[in-house]
Amino acid sequence: MEMPLSDRTNAEHDDLTLILTWIKQYNDNVKDVLEESHPKNNQEIKELICPLVPLIRDLSKTLCAKLSGTTETLRTTLHMLKEVQEKFRDLNATNDYINYLIVVNQILGDTERNLKQSEEHLKNIHVQSKYLVDENHKSGAGVKIAYEGIDRIGNNEEITGTIESAETRGNTSHEEELATNEQGDKPDNSIISNSNNNEDETNEPEMDKDSMTEEHGHLKNRNTSCEQEINPQPEQKENVLELSGSVDTINGTSHSDERLLDLEAWTYKEYTLQDEEMGEERLACFIKAPSSILQKLQCRFMDDISSLVVSDSEELVSNVLNISSLDDHLKIPFPISISIPFNSHYRGSYKDVMVKIIDEKVQSSYLTPNSLEGHHGEYKGSFAEVKVYKLGTFSVVSCLKKENVTVLKKGLSLKLSVDSRISLNYPPGCFSSSVIVQFKVQPIDTSLISVLKAKHDIYHPVVSSSPIIQVKQPSVQAFHKPVTVFLPCPPNPEKKKAGDDAENKRAASAAASRTTGTHQIRAVSASVRKHSDNPSEFMKLLALKEDQWIVLDDIVVKNVQNGIVSFDVTEHIRRFIVVRLSSAMDNTHLISFIQSLEYAIYSSMVNVVLYRKNDNFNKVIVKLVPSKELNWEISALIEAGYNGPPEPSEAIALQEGDQMHFRFCGNIAASDNDGKESGKTFKLTFHSQRMQKKYLDLRVVDEFGNYSSPHYKGTVVFYKISREEVIGSYNTGLSTDNYIQQRTPECKLSVTLPKVEKHVSRPSSTKLLTLAPGDMLWDSVLKWVSQELSEEDTSELLLSLPIHRSTIQIVRLKSPDNLTAQIYELLSLWKKRLPTSTDKFRLLARHLHKSGRSDLVDEMKVKWEPNMRGLPAM
């Protein structure tokens, strides 16, 4: 009788698990041998290698069978989707659904091509392993080649992804759902797609002892026939050569093109790039590959698209780095190793460091770093090192840790590793088959709740909350039995403090009355209350369904013990939280509180700092500084030679990937290091763990402007652009200036530049003219008047004198700090423009009288008028 499909699938799954387990064990043994300074003899090496050849062959056959079946299934699905797409077009469906089907069509088409390439790659590995082991086993090289072949199979993500992908890719579609977009189940046209999240790992099923013994017996049989497989007959050897394709002969030994690269020395190469802001070289990454390949790879920073890199709950901790090939036809012997430097300030049990990859189709995937600490030459610090199988755009992000658990039909009781207080109990028969469930935990800082309560009185009943739990599992798998969830939710600290005070009072009264009877002491001790369900408190469960928070009033949340609550759910909830209330609260207010709390979790308070260089006011720095680090950052800027004014802006709430765009207005403009025009809009992208800054050069727009001030004045206007708006602008190709024109600024900072006295150089051949007696007398009068006038008197006098405004501005620019010189030059210009026959003395007296300085007129008549008589008219 034919084996049922489910049993046959489980049997294949167990066989694949056993093969991978044994390969890993023998792989470790071979690795230990290679790392020894004195290798063992050929006979012992042969004994270690013998089991690997048939295991690799079995693995290749099993994976090829699975990939062939999956390819056929995808081909059929692709054909059906095309028909559905045509139907949708016939029914005048919306463009959103058509676009979604087109994206799915492209993804499935790419998957089909990758599967075909993977199948061919596995066949080549199987064929080459036989031939290469036979050619090199005498010199011990076969050990290294077999080990590299195993390493390719174990790590190649394009062929097998992870062990989880190799085990589950041929099963039902409920496991594919875990690799869908991180944003939710509905179609998402966002530029960032998380459909290829390769970092998820599953727990392998445990193997019983009987199956291990049986498999061990098969391995013994393989060992007995291993000698024959390593020494094939001449006819078999010729067939192998025909299958392996074109070969080259080097030193009498045949090698394929791929093996030529493998035999070349692999080494690390340091890639440094010019920092446009600092004007110096900065480390970009280290790449390990053959020397000939390293010479044809190039790196460049792409920090301008950092808003597109991060998604919800992620924080960028490195530069955005693009790695590409200078030769489009370059054959790279993947996998190659890439080490990216990063700096993560906050690490904890809830956070994980991952390498995020964005390919040319702007699709994202994740890789778990092999290590986070490195030492490359003179560089020592945090390096995220990964093995990659394709080039693209790389960055290191800090994200919530994902925990994958396989729930079997027999049920499971588990505690999450990120927080042991969070546990779930899946009873036997909860699922009809094994299900992979993924958990993420977002902790809630109690200070956030306090801030929200202080800002909004309607949130006052909120006492505390549990972490936000995110659960992802196949939606087709419904609960057949309720699942019990246990969460930490801190009790009311005020009630606990009141209880402690009551206990202290009772203890003091008991100590004071030592003559009290035994029955009274028992009564006092019995009255001490334990922490349990408080009838005056309420606990509410809120869940996110269809991208909206709702209150599940039909689910009862109970206190299990102090600070731990539990409840039962009968259906899958994708995202949920428990809130403890001191009194009843309206559901609309409670939902508003959760929305505000969720926004506050992913937001940071930031100040904008614009400081000038102490020795050159034309050079400024603009930074986005978290408010909690403001004092330290200002001290660092002062030490670096920068200072205000202006003072830092008020705190602004920004989320990861949000941008601050700013422009210079007024009589001051700016340009960056690329020398672009000063009318440009500058931008800074906020990342909580990466300090963003901009160095600018200031210049005056109109040197004759701001005539009434000793400084040139300007204003810097800042606008906030959210990450969603940046992504939308990227998708539509529209400029973000459209958003700026439609909103009010977040803040404004005033900036000034001092006016500098200009020295006019005259030719040395200029002849000094001798002044006539009348000119010398008038020069003395004007100097005397200039010395007697104050700044207010000057303003009144200039209103009376017929002097153009532009002339006054020019004179003030010549002597900005010398009022007497300004008045003297203006009076001299006024006198020169008067006709010769004019009575200048009487006219000057009239203007002084209008300006309110009649006293000067009287004194001038006594002191200078007698000398004016008898002089010719001037």
Image (cartoon, rainbow, N blue to C red):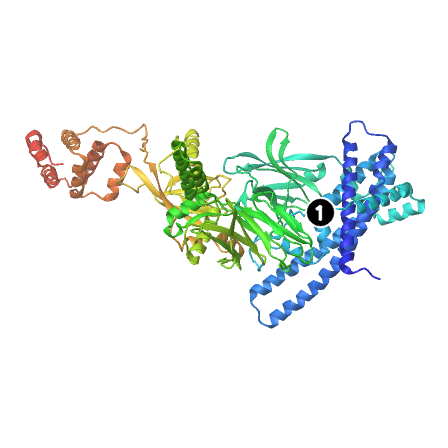
Residue 834: percent from left, percent from top: 16, 41
Front-lying residue, 582 or 407: 582
From the image, tell me which residue sits under label 1. 204
Tag 1: amino acid = Glu
Tally of numbered tags: 1
Quadrant of res 150: top right
Residue 777: percent from left, percent from top: 14, 30
Residue 581 visible from this viewpoint: yes
Q: Quadrant of the C terminus?
A: top left
Residue 259: percent from left, percent from top: 79, 41
Front-lying residue, 740 or 795: 740
- What residue is drawn where x is 81% and y is 43%? 256
Measured along the vertical axis of the image, is residue 548 above or below residue 380? Answer: below
- Which residue of the protein is positioned furthest toward the bottom in this rendering? 91
Q: Quadrant of the N terminus?
A: bottom right
- What residue is drawn where x is 44% and y is 45%? 492
Measured along the vertical axis of the image, is residue 514 above or below residue 325? Answer: above
Front-lying residue, 180 or 81: 180
Front-lying residue, 228 or 525: 525
Q: Residues within 10 Å of mark 1 (few under 14, many from 20)?
A: some
Q: Is 406 situated left or right of 211 in this image?
A: left
Q: Secondary structure at mark 1?
A: loop
Q: Is 152 situated left or right of 864 in this image?
A: right
Q: Is 410 situated left or right of 415 in this image?
A: right
- What residue is drawn where x is 69% and y is 57%? 433
Q: Is 653 situated left or right of 771 in this image?
A: right
Residue 229: percent from left, percent from top: 89, 43
Quadrant of res 373: top right
Residue 680 visible from this viewpoint: no
- Which residue of the protein is positioned furthest toward the right in this rendering? 234
